[in-house]
């Protein structure tokens, strides 16, 4: 989807063909603000985004008629099947409790349960406490069941 315009500005990604400095280039990599370009003759250079877009004669080549594909404003969670969302939300309380000690939102003003206190226990120790609470007996301590929960599975599908 190289060369698509979003909000009147060109959207350039790896694989895009651009005209810059009077020559045709292909974007082969992005690194921070740097665009790694390779020319038709094999020459290569790295150009900062600001210089590339402001360069005289800069243009994105190719099909610009396609609309930009964007993540919906509300994110990908709402695009998952309802059953998967319900399973993920059921795990959310447990995951939050392991991460920050509070079963609700971080700023919920709740009381941290002693076995999930981040000031007292490492993340691995809190994971073990949650596994014990839920009756899980992991085969290896480094592979806690929370990491294979529906919430993590949902994230892997993105």
Image (spheres, rainbow, N blue to C red):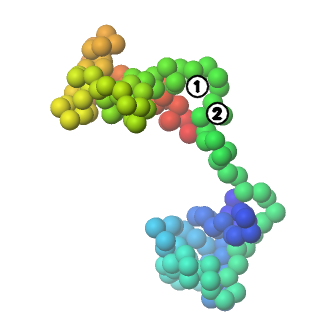
Task: Establish if 3 lies above or below 96.
Answer: below
The residue that mark 1 highlights is: 85
* Residue 9 occupies quadrant: bottom right
The residue that mark 2 highlights is: 78
Q: Nearer the viewer, residue 98 or 54?
A: 98
**Label 2 environment density (alpha carbons within 10 Å; few <14, some 14–19, many ≥20):** few
**Label 1 environment density (alpha carbons within 10 Å; few <14, some 14–19, many ≥20):** some
Estimate the spatial distance between the alpha carbons at disc 1 and disc 2, rounded to whole Å. 8 Å
Q: Earlier in the sequence, mark 1 or mark 2?
A: 2
Quadrant where the N terminus is found in the figure: bottom right
Point out which mark residue 100 bears. Answer: none
Assign a secondary structure to mark 1.
helix
Across and down, in percent, residue 123 comes to 26, 33
Q: Is residue 84 visible?
A: yes
Assign a secondary structure to mark 2.
helix
Q: Nearer the viewer, residue 33 or 123?
A: 123
Q: What residue sits 72% from the left and 57% below the top? A: 68
The count of marks equals 2
Q: What residue sits 31% from the left and 29% below the top? A: 101
């Amino acid at each position: 989807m190289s060369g698509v315009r979003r909000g009147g500005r060109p959207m350039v990604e790896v694989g895009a063909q651009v005209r810059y400095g009077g020559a045709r280039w292909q974007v082969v990599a992005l690194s921070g603000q740097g665009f790694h370009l390779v020319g038709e003759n094999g020459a290569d250079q790295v150009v900062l985004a600001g210089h590339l877009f402001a360069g005289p004669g800069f243009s994105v080549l190719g099909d610009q008629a396609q609309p930009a594909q964007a993540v919906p404003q509300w994110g990908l969670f709402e695009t998952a099947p309802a059953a998967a969302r319900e399973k993920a939300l059921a795990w959310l309380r447990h995951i939050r409790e392991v991460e920050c000690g509070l079963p609700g939102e971080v700023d919920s003003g709740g009381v941290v349960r002693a076995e999930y206190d981040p000031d007292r226990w490492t993340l691995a120790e809190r994971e073990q406490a949650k596994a014990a609470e839920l009756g899980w007996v992991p085969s290896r301590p480094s592979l806690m069941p929370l990491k294979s929960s529906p919430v993590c599975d949902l994230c892997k599908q993105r």
